């Protein structure tokens, strides 16, 4: 890589210097780390990383370039990117572009030549913290540190509405967008309304493959608008930020969740829990990576999952509002999934569509479809 001055300055005063690549400029965000060994393109385009400076723990990044078929949204969602070593060349017959050129084209500053082990240890001990990533920036270290300290915390920010479908024209999915179901196999497809808080595209592909026709709506949708669409199921997507800040959608879900089978992933899981009366809290440094072990209580088995979140649902508050914890995160014993005991509502804190296992959790989409088929059968039988 061409030598360019770049720095990452954390709010605790730590400074990590290295080479700049991607775009020039300065970005402030919450600095978080991901332990996945591959999938940098999917991570960079995951809207759940919106507003964050992403650090990868794997040592060598960019060697297989960027492929347009593999993105999870229209463009990179991160504020900045930090790696140990950025590959100067790519080797992949599917690649459309090199990673440095792609980041530069989208205005994302990046930093390499950093001891990412030391940086991750700092984040693990001090927790995820704000930082500024500056490339080709003449400001002093003291000026950058003061800028970080004056920046707002991500807690309390409604980033889901900003990242969701139709927000500022940045995402192609709108109120009128459909992901049609495949040709009929076992009857008509299940009609699903998907509330897009920053969804990964692969979630929609899995819903379609499971037999759903998906209508995508923004997080500002109302319960009246959803009912007018006459869905057989409601899906609530992943997304960025503090779930408790998405107050409008929580009220909507409080009114409509469970009227038809309802399924939430990641942020959607947290929003459904809040709508039911549970509480959420911020994890010290979050769960981000493709190697997160989860225990399925009902099936008595372990799944290796992909996760990307900084908040968690409180277990005691879930049980107090009539829910059962169905999945536990084995690294720290936090909630990774739940079901309501009397309503067709379920959520998981991981990404079954990301397939790190590779397919250990994909049947959750099937369970959602089965619940819609059961509701359809009961309606025909008049029950």
Image: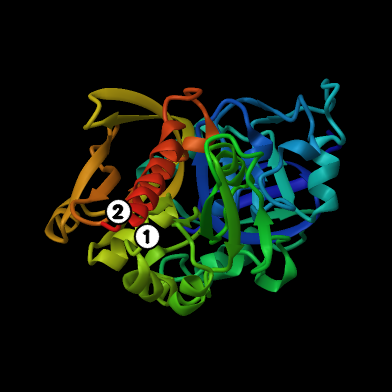
Instruction: Report helix, strand or loop for mark 2.
Output: loop
Instruction: Sort mark 1 into few (<14), some (14-19) or many (20+) by Cα contacts within 10 Å.
Output: many
Specify whether residue 7 is in view: yes
Please give the count of numbered marks on the rendered protein.
Answer: 2
Q: Earlier in the sequence, mark 1 or mark 2?
A: 1
Q: Residue at x 49, y 34 (%)?
A: 118
Q: Is residue 1 left or right of residue 284?
A: right
Please state which of residues 284 and 331 is positioned toward the viewer in this rendering: 331
Q: Residue at x 71, y 42 (%)?
A: 71
Q: Position of residue 223 (x, y in %)?
A: 44, 75
Residue 252 sits in which quadrant?
bottom left
List the single residue furthest toward the front.
381
Q: Residue at x 42, y 25 (%)?
A: 360
Q: Position of residue 354 (x, y in %)?
A: 54, 34
Q: Position of residue 196 (x, y in %)?
A: 55, 60
Q: Quick check: marks 1 and 2 in contact, CB under 8 Å?
A: yes
In the image, is residue 188 above or below residue 155?
above
Instruction: Sort mark 2 into few (<14), some (14-19) or many (20+) by Cα contacts within 10 Å.
Output: some
Label 1, on which residue?
A: 260
The N terminus is located in which quarter? top right
Q: Marks 1/2: CA distance?
A: 7 Å
Q: Residue at x 78, y 46 (%)?
A: 103
Label 2, on which residue?
A: 344
Please state which of residues 201 and 312 is positioned toward the viewer in this rendering: 201
Instruction: Report helix, strand or loop for mark 1.
Output: loop
Q: Is residue 352 left or right of residue 112?
A: left
Residue 275 sits in which quadrant?
bottom left
Please state which of residues 68 and 139 is positioned toward the viewer in this rendering: 68
In the image, is residue 240 above or below residue 34?
below
Residue 95 sits in which quadrant?
top right
Q: Position of residue 24 (x, y in %)?
A: 81, 54
In the image, is residue 132 above or below residue 159?
above
């Amino acid at each position: 890589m061409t030598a360019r001055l770049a720095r990452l300055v954390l709010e605790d005063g730590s400074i990590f210097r290295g080479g700049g690549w991607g775009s020039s400029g300065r970005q402030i965000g919450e600095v978080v780390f991901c332990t996945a060994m591959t999938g940098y393109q999917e991570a960079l385009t995951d809207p759940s990383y919106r507003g964050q400076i992403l650090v990868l723990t794997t040592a060598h990044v960019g060697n297989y370039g960027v492929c347009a078929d593999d993105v999870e949204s229209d463009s990179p969602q991160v504020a900045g990117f930090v790696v140990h070593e950025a590959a100067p060349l790519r080797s992949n017959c599917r690649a459309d572009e090199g990673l440095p050129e792609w980041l530069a084209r989208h205005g994302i500053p990046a930093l390499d030549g950093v001891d990412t082990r030391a940086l991750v240890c700092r984040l693990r001990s001090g927790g995820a913290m704000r930082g500024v990533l500056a490339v080709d920036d003449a400001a002093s270290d003291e000026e950058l540190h003061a800028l970080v300290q004056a920046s707002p915390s991500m807690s309390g920010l409604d980033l889901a509405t900003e990242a969701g479908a139709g927000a500022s024209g940045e995402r192609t999915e709108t109120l009128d967008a459909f992901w049609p179901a495949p040709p009929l196999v076992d009857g008509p497809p299940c009609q699903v309304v998907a509330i897009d808080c920053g969804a990964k595209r692969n979630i929609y592909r899995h819903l379609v493959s499971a037999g759903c026709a998906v209508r995508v709506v923004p997080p500002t949708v109302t319960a009246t608008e959803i009912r007018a669409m006459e869905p057989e199921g409601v899906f609530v997507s992943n997304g960025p930020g503090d779930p408790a800040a998405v107050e409008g959608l929580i009220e909507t879900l409080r009114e409509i969740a469970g009227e038809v089978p309802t399924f939430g992933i990641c942020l959607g899981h947290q929003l459904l829990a809040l709508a039911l009366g549970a509480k959420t809290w911020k994890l010290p440094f979050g769960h981000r990576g493709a190697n997160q072990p989860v225990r399925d209580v009902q099936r008595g088995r372990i799944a290796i999952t992909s996760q990307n979140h900084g908040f968690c649902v409180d277990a005691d508050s879930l049980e107090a509002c009539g829910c059962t914890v169905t999945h536990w995160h084995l690294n720290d014993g936090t909630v990774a999934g739940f079901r309501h005991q009397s309503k067709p509502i379920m959520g998981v804190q991981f990404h079954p569509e990301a397939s790190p296992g590779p397919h250990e959790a994909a049947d959750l989409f099937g369970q959602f479809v089965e619940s819609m088929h059961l509701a359809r059968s009961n309606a025909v039988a008049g029950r």
